[in-house]
Image (cartoon, rainbow, N blue to C red):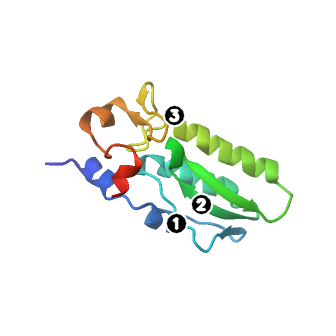
Amino acid sequence: MQSDSTNQIQSFDSVSHFKSLDLGKKLILNQYFEPEYGYGWKIIVENLIKNLTPFKFQLDSIDDSFGILNVQFTLLTQSHEIAILREIHKSLTDSRSTCATCGDLLSKYHASIGRLPKCNNCFKKGVGGTGTWLDKY
């Protein structure tokens, strides 16, 4: 029998999670925007959006490409570009040291290019699939 936390991880939907966030009035989403990230990075995404809501720009994508939280955007004005880049860089850095499956901070992790970082516990249990693009199929 699976634990509640394992069920929560496996049933996590990043699109529904993102829609539940308060985006503010200045943040514009690309018409094809569909976020894709794991349960373990939901806090990182929440903090990112909270810190970016004061700025006016277009969010093009948030996904877990290349084993990190990859954020792509379009500047609508030149103001605040450094602040926006700092927040995005912080989320990228945080994602490197956070298990994409459960959200635990990593002391030692199992990752390689194109593979999501996993803590030892998730790696040993096999929770969250392989951590590669094959999990999408």
The residue lying at 52 percent from left, 66 percent from top is 34
- SS for dot 1: loop
Dot 2 corresponds to which residue?
A: 61
Above or below — where is 13 with respect to 51? below
Dot 3 corresponds to which residue?
A: 97
Query: Is 106 positioned to the left or the right of 93 in the image?
Result: left
Query: Depth-wise, is mark 2 or mark 3 nearer the camera?
Result: 2
Q: Residue furthest top?
A: 108
Q: Earlier in the sequence, mark 1 or mark 3?
A: 1
The residue lying at 51 percent from left, 61 percent from top is 35
The one of 113 and 41 positioned closer to us in this rendering: 113
Q: Earlier in the sequence, mark 2 or mark 3?
A: 2
Query: Is 85 positioned to the left or the right of 64 in the image?
Result: right
The three-letter code of the residue at mark 3 reads Ser
**Whole-percent x, y for residue 64 in the image:** 50, 50
Q: Give how far apart the Cα atoms at labels 2 and 3 are.
A: 21 Å
Query: Is 37 positioned to the left or the right of 119 in the image?
Result: right
- SS for dot 2: strand
Dot 1 corresponds to which residue?
A: 34
Tell me if label 1 and label 3 are in contact, CB under 8 Å: no
Q: Residue furthest bottom?
A: 31
The one of 82 and 67 positioned closer to us in this rendering: 67
Q: Earlier in the sequence, mark 1 or mark 2?
A: 1
The three-letter code of the residue at mark 1 reads Glu
Dot 2, how many residues are within 10 Å of its Cα: few (below 14), some (14-19), or many (20+)?
some
Above or below — where is 109 with respect to 44? above
Above or below — where is 55 with respect to 68? below
User: Within the image, what quadrant is residue 12 found in?
Assistant: bottom left
